[in-house]
Amino acid sequence: MFFVFFIGTAGSGKSTLTGVFAEWLKQHDVNVATVNLDPGVRKLPYAPDVDVRDYVRVEDVMLNYELGPNGALILSIDMLIGEIDRLKNEIEELRPDYVLVDTPGQMELFAYRSVGPYLVSVLGGDRCAIVYLVDGVLASNPLSYVSIFLLGLSVQYRFNKPQIYVLTKKDMLSEEDLNRILEWSEDHMSLLNAIDLEGRGLRREMSLRICELLSEMGLPSGLILTSSVKWEGLDDLYAVLQRICAGGEDFVVYE
Ligand SMILES: Nc1nc2c(ncn2[C@@H]2O[C@H](COP(=O)(O)OP(=O)(O)O)[C@@H](O)[C@H]2O)c(=O)[nH]1
Ligand SMILES: [Mg+2]
């Protein structure tokens, strides 16, 4: 069993990609299971095989603990720790080769509370990868690009698992925007030049160091461009996951 955790800011396309990639894998005869880890989600674009809402529901937590929606969501996500054995058993019973895990909409509640790294290490162990989603529409601005990738590094630091960077919503970007983003991902000086053009007072020295950090630490497999609408880039994503699954040396985890 190999676990893939989809992590990214709210609206970056986690749930959509989970559903579409699962369909793509099925069409390629891969035995796959999907897991929804978001106790607060109302509607999903796919029918998960394992659903944490069977164990914890935000509506029930609101009633039982007399909490508002935000407090109940935080508590619900923390409560997942107590359900980990049941979740694990349910997944194992399906005997999948690939397990795609859709994480809570509000990334910070999952990534920066103890529950996220704990769940990832208990479920995935050393047979897992994190797919960090970069919202393509947001990333076409160089300052946003840098912020989103810094957040990606922070996720990488937090979870310490092999991590792939996937740009979503490729279909919403022009050819020109896509080429610019790809260039930034491959050459940090071009990113620095683009930041300079924005001229919003970010100090050059700081930008330079961040860009260097991103180019050194970030993208071992490059940036994978996907569209869940057009089913594009899914083969590239699978190829990189298979490399990690086979123990690819370029995905360093800092012990
Ligand atoms: N055009 C386009 N829209 C997308 C794509 N992926 C997701 N979306 C849309 O982006 C919104 C947020 O997606 P969702 O999967 O719910 O994001 P999540 O909060 O990260 O789970 C939804 O309206 C999706 O239909 C894509 O590849 N292309
Ligand atoms: Mg979602």
Image (tube, rainbow, N blue to C red):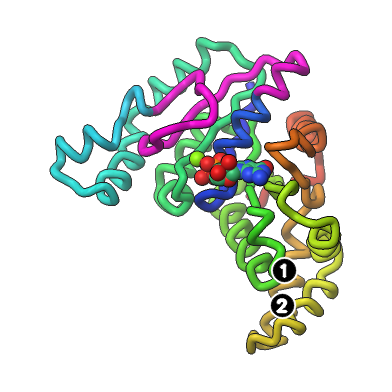
Q: Is residue 19 left or right of residue 110?
A: right
Quarter of the rendering containing residue 63:
top left
Helix, strand or loop at label 1? It is: helix
**Residue tagged 2:** 209
Q: Which residue lies at the image location 20% right of the left edge and 40% below the top edge?
A: 62
Magenta segment? 23-52
Pick the front one: 77 or 254 = 77
Disc 1 crowd rating (10 Å Cα; few below 14, some 14-19, many 20+) is some
Q: Which residue lies at the image location 67% right of the left edge and 68% below the top edge?
A: 146
Q: Is residue 45 magenta?
A: yes
**Residue tagged 1:** 213
- Pointers 2 and 1 in contact (C-beta within 8 Å): yes
Quadrant of image for the N terminus:
top right
> x%, y% of residue 136?
68, 54
Disc 2 crowd rating (10 Å Cα; few below 14, some 14-19, many 20+) is few
Q: Is residue 108 left or right of residue 242?
A: left
Q: Is residue 224 left or right of residue 203?
A: right
